[in-house]
Amino acid sequence: QVQLVESGGGLVQAGGSLRLSCEASGSIFRLNFMGWSRQAPGEQRELVASITNGGNTNYADSVKGRFTISRDNAKNTVYLQMNSLKPEDTAVYYCLAEVTTTTRATALYWGQGTQVTVSS
């Protein structure tokens, strides 16, 4: 079993910053790509940012230049630094990770989500 636990969400004013963290634990052989997705009320889930185990990153156009994804492989943790936040960034943010477990099975895992609210 693999668990992803997010932290760092909350309420912030427009223009402010937040840093999300997500730690993976359990029967992990290898963490492949990791990322953050978000879902606003009434909207489809959107992949915001992703990072490979080699450090290559990819961002949604809506967050380029404002959000930065990083990972600490020694801690099995991925981060999302969010700057210049806008009200439209308000959503539940989910951590995701493609994990190869100790049984060599590979699957996509999701965290439980953390709320980010940006007030205008």
Image (cartoon, helix red, strand yellow):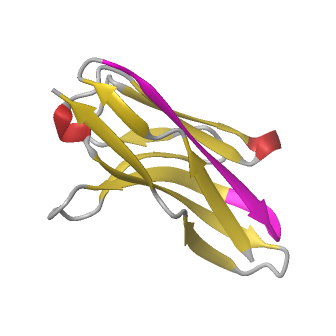
Q: Position of residue 51 (x, y in %)?
A: 54, 44
Q: Quadrant of residue 73?
A: top right
Does 30 appear above or below 103? above
Question: Is residue 83 shown left or right of residue 76?
Answer: left
Region of the chain picked out in magenta, as a range: 16-31
Residue 11 image-quadrant placement: top left
Number of labelled discs? Answer: 0
Magenta segment, prevailing SS (helix, strand or loop): strand
Q: Is residue 88 left or right of residue 45?
A: left
Query: Residue at the location (23% across, 55% down)?
Result: 40
The quadrant of the image that shows the C terminus is top left
Q: Residue at x 79, y 78 (%)?
A: 104
| Residue 103 lies in quadrant | bottom right
Q: Is residue 62 magenta?
A: no
Q: Position of residue 36 (x, y in %)?
A: 45, 50
Q: In the image, is residue 52 above or below residue 18?
A: below
Q: Is residue 83 toward the left or the right of residue 2 in the image?
A: left
- Of 97 and 13, nearer the camera is 13
Q: Quadrant of the N terminus?
A: bottom right
Q: Is residue 24 visible?
A: yes
**As rendered, which of 2 and 55 lies closer to the eye?**
2
Q: Residue at x 26, y 17 (%)?
A: 15
Q: Is residue 61 visible?
A: no
- Where is residue 96 drawn, in percent x and y? 52, 60
